[in-house]
Image (cartoon, rainbow, N blue to C red):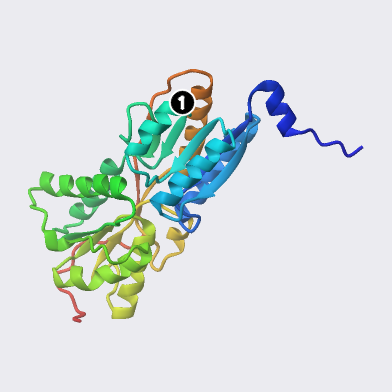
Amino acid sequence: MGYIPSDVARSLTASRTWTIGMVLATTADPFMGRVVEGVEQVAVNAGFNVFISTSQNDRERELAAIETLHRRRVEGIIIIASHVIKRYWRHLDDVRVPVVIIDEQDVSDRIHFVTVDDKQGASLAVEHLLGLGHRRIGYVGVTNRPKSNQYRLRGYQAALDAAGIKPDPELIYDSPEIEDHAGRGKASLAPLWAAGATAVFCYNDTVAVGLLAACYQRGVVVPDHLSVIGFDDIDMAVYAVPPLTTIRQPRFELGQRAMEMMLDLLEGQTPENYLVPGELVIRQTTAGLLPHKNPVF
């Protein structure tokens, strides 16, 4: 007869809204899509709706999005790649809203997280390059993911230290002028090449794709002249030219785990934080060290 049950009436009767809020840094990041799918699959199966809001990599917008979700009486909040400052975590503790962070860790004793092991994954990437004979290995970081960037930089440095190589600041590209990830990768080629890099570990696959584009434009052949490795294993990594060697994050599983953790929290349980190791996926952008480089620019 066309009758549609009222979710508002249902929430008043049960004193529950059956909604979960999600805050994404941006919908433009290819990493986000599969994570959201994982969250929604578990949420829908448990009878929950998911409200999604984006912060566009802006702290104030993220705070505003979280406050809006509070006003809508969501039962929990899942945040991907958070930018909010630490003082806000105390406010979340005060209002007793369950919060799960994806792609971040160590934000608060009372806020739970699900993330890849950034340090382990970064070390795995650099160890792969070291095993191919590279010693001048660059790192291209980002400025709008401060916590995960810090952990990946530590993993990069730890792998070099373990091999008896002192990290060279000239091989770390951390210019704050470009926030666009692909743009940072593209801009990093000239200074890293000038510093003598024979291989580069990129913060994520989008950075790596930008670097590959710069290599193509400058006549740098990958991997003959320069090896490149990314992080995430986004869907487009296999279609890069050449196909990108990377560290795989189980993005769909991260979303599933985050929502499962949220359900446990709503049932009054105390779940363990989930830290998953990265997996090396070898494709065609890394190779053994060659004795010379041809391009000069």
When asked about the image quadrant of residue 279, the answer is top left
Q: Give the image quarter of residue 86.
A: top left
The answer to whether one can see residue 211 in this image is no
Assign the C terminus to one quadrant of the image.
Answer: bottom left
Between 221 and 30, which is closer to the camera in this rendering? 30
Residue 135 sits above or below residue 87 on the image: below
Farthest residue in the top direction?
268
Q: Is residue 105 left or right of residue 101?
A: left
> Horizontal placement of 154 versus 185: left or right?
left
Place of residue 104 in the rendered image (x, y in percent of width and height, measured from the top left): 36, 41
Q: Which residue is mark 1?
A: 96
Furthest toward the right, the residue is 1
- What is the quadrant of residue 75 in the picture? top right
Task: Give residue 263's position: percent from left, percent from top.
Answer: 53, 26
56 is higher (above) or lower (below) than 150: below
Question: Which residue is at a point 16% across and 44% down the rendered structure image?
Answer: 158
Q: Relative to 124, does residue 286 appear above or below in the rendering?
A: below
**How many residues crowd mark 1 within 10 Å: few (<14), some (14–19), many (20+)?**
few
Position of residue 236 measured from the top left corner of the image (x, y, whole percent): 47, 60
Q: Picture coordinates of residue 179 (x, y %)?
A: 34, 62
Judge left or right: residue 158 versus residue 268.
Answer: left
Secondary structure beneath label 1: loop
Residue type at mark 1: give it. Answer: Arg
Q: Is residue 159 visible?
A: yes
Residue 5 vertical position relative to residue 35 in the rendered view, above or below: above
Q: What's the residue at 64%, 35% (across, down)?
A: 44
Q: Quadrant of the N terminus?
A: top right
